[in-house]
Each structure stands twice: as structure tokens, then as C-alpha cells.
Image (cartoon, rainbow, N blue to C red):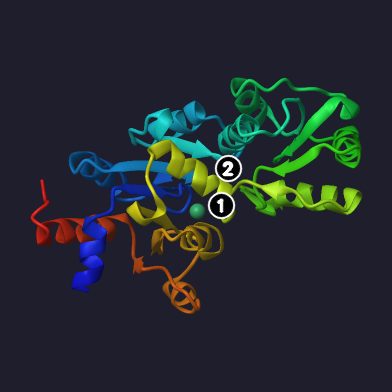
Amino acid sequence: MADSLHALARLRAVFLDMDGVIYVGSRPLPGAQALFDYLDATGRQWMLVTNNAAFTSQQFSDRVAAMGLRVPPERILGSAEATASWLRYQVARGWPEGKVIVMGQGGLRSALTQADFELTEDPFAATYAVSGANFELTYRDLADVTLAIRNGAHFIGTNSDRTYPTERGQVPGAGSILALLVAATDKEPVVIGKPNAPMFEEALRRLAVTPSDALMVGDRYETDIVGALALGMSTVGVLTGVDSRAAFEAQSVPPHWVLEGLPDLLALLRQADAGQGMAP
Ligand SMILES: [Mg+2]
């Protein structure tokens, strides 16, 4: 316990999932703002990391502001923006410049254009085919992206979440659209979102920290925790969202800590810092 508290005190950055960690639906969870304030006061960096590709960082920031949480847009990374940044990074490292055909909506389109990609509707002019959730898709959209991939466009998915929660229940998400495109093309996409490495790598790059300096806080073992453990990050599972304590603890590699919620994480950090003489 003393060793693990020592490790916690030394962390320089904290990444948090959004839904089920800082809010549920439109209800903020206790302790979120107090944790952000404590991380700021102790000189630690933090960032919210979500597979949701429907909104820009500014839109996410406005949504959490309506819940009374102060989170500047640069502290929010959604999978639309992560996908655009990741692809720009690959092009800088030698992938070809080229146009992008998009299966997706405004958030993904604007993230790609802000990363200086030219979008195209022509499947035979596309170097990249990027697919996310699209709640207005038509057969024509599916056919065009299929043709682009079959014609050799690099196939990239924002995230593989198969369903998307709505007031009416679970509806098809980005992963279900990817499954259709896989069936139609016999090609497998590179997927950016959690639990895949690109999303975490983009988040780490933005805060200029290494995995061993970073803590990931999530409510879902399969996405938040699996991906972070694979990169060597420390992990906290919280019980305010999808997974129960029993579900976390039944895993062959459980999270480093399983906590009721963010107030317990803040208490643990304070205890760790006090033990190191680092409390503010
Ligand atoms: Mg979640």
C-alpha cells in the first residue's frame, strides 16, 4: 500500500473518461470539479478522453459547462479530433497527402478540415476513408465509402463502440457501421478510439507525458482500462458507470485501484501527497 501510494504521488497526468466518470447523461457526478481543482493546484496535468465522435471539443466544453464543470476545450479529446490529429501525424511521418471520404457528421468533418484535410464525396478520389457514427446515413453513403476502400483508400474508424445510448435505448454506433463496411470490403480498419493505442498515444502526446507518468480513470474495463494497461499506464476503475466492483476485480489483470467514485480518488491522492510531503 505504501508503495502504491508512492506511485500515485509521483503521477504527473490524469486522463478521465467522461460518461460514467464525470457525468451520467446530463447529471454531473460528485467530486469532478474538486478533483480538477486539486490536480491544477498540485501542478498535474489532466484531460478528458472520450470515444464519442459526435461533438467538437468546444461543444463538449459547452455541454459540461451546462453541468457546472469548468473544462476548457483543450482539455477534452474526443475520438473525432483524435482521429484527425492521429491521421495528420501519420501524414507528417510519411503517409501520402490525400483527400478524405467521410462516413460521419459535423463533428468529424470539422475535425478533419481543421487538421487541413480536404474532404471529397468521390470514392475514386479518396486516399483515406474515415468512418464514425452517422445518424443520418443513407445507402449512398455506405456504397461510396465501400467503393473508396475497395479502390485502395486507407480504412480508418473513429471507434468500435457497437451501440450508442439514447433515451430510447441502445442504437447502432460507429462500430456497427464499421462492421458493415468490413463485411462489404473484406478489409479491417485501423481504429483510433479506446481501447486501441492511437487514442491514448494522442492524449499522451498532447500532454507531453509518458505512460508511466499517467493515470487513466474509467468506468468500463473493456475500453478505458484495457487500453491504458496495454500501454503501461496506472489505472483506476470507478463504480459510477458501467462496471461493478465484482466485474473489475474478476479480470485477470484488474485496475490498480477500484474506487466508488471521484471523491475517493481525490482522498487517495491527498493521502499519497501528504505521505510524500507534496500536499499543497
Ligand atoms: Mg464511460
| Residue at x-position 44% and y-position 44% | 204
- In the figure, is residue 98 to the left or right of 56? right
Q: Are marks 2 and 1 in contact (CB under 8 Å)?
A: no
Q: Mark 2 is on which residue type?
A: Asn
Residue 108, given in percent of the width and then of the height, sits at 65, 31
User: Does residue 110 sit above or below 86 in this rendering?
Assistant: above
Residue 205 or residue 183, whichever sits in front: 205
Residue 193 or residue 11, whichever sits in front: 11
Residue 273, given in percent of the width and then of the height, sits at 15, 56
Q: Is residue 91 visible?
A: yes
Residue 112 or residue 212, whichever sits in front: 212
Q: Nearer the viewer, mark 2 or mark 1?
A: 1
| Residue at x-position 90% and y-position 49% | 184
Mark 1, other Cα within 10 Å: few <14 / some 14–19 / many ≥20: some
Residue identifier under label 1: 197
- Which of the 4 image quadrants contains residue 109? top right
Residue identifier under label 2: 52
Q: Determine whether the beta carbon of the residue marked 2 sits less than 8 angstroms from the nearest atom of ligand 1.
A: no
- In the figure, is residue 30 to the left or right of 38? right
Residue 254, given in percent of the width and then of the height, sits at 44, 73
Residue at the far front in the pictured view: 94
First-in-chain label (2 vs 1): 2
Mark 2, other Cα within 10 Å: few <14 / some 14–19 / many ≥20: many
Residue at the far left in the pictured view: 277
Q: Mark 1 is on which residue type?
A: Ala
| Residue at x-position 45% and y-position 50% | 17
Give the alpha-carbon distance from disc 2 to disc 1, as whole Å: 16 Å
Which quarter of the image is occupied by the C terminus?
A: top left
Residue 232, given in percent of the width and then of the height, sits at 44, 61
Mark 2 element type: loop
What label sits on residue 121 in the rendered view? none
| Residue at x-position 78% and y-position 39% | 154
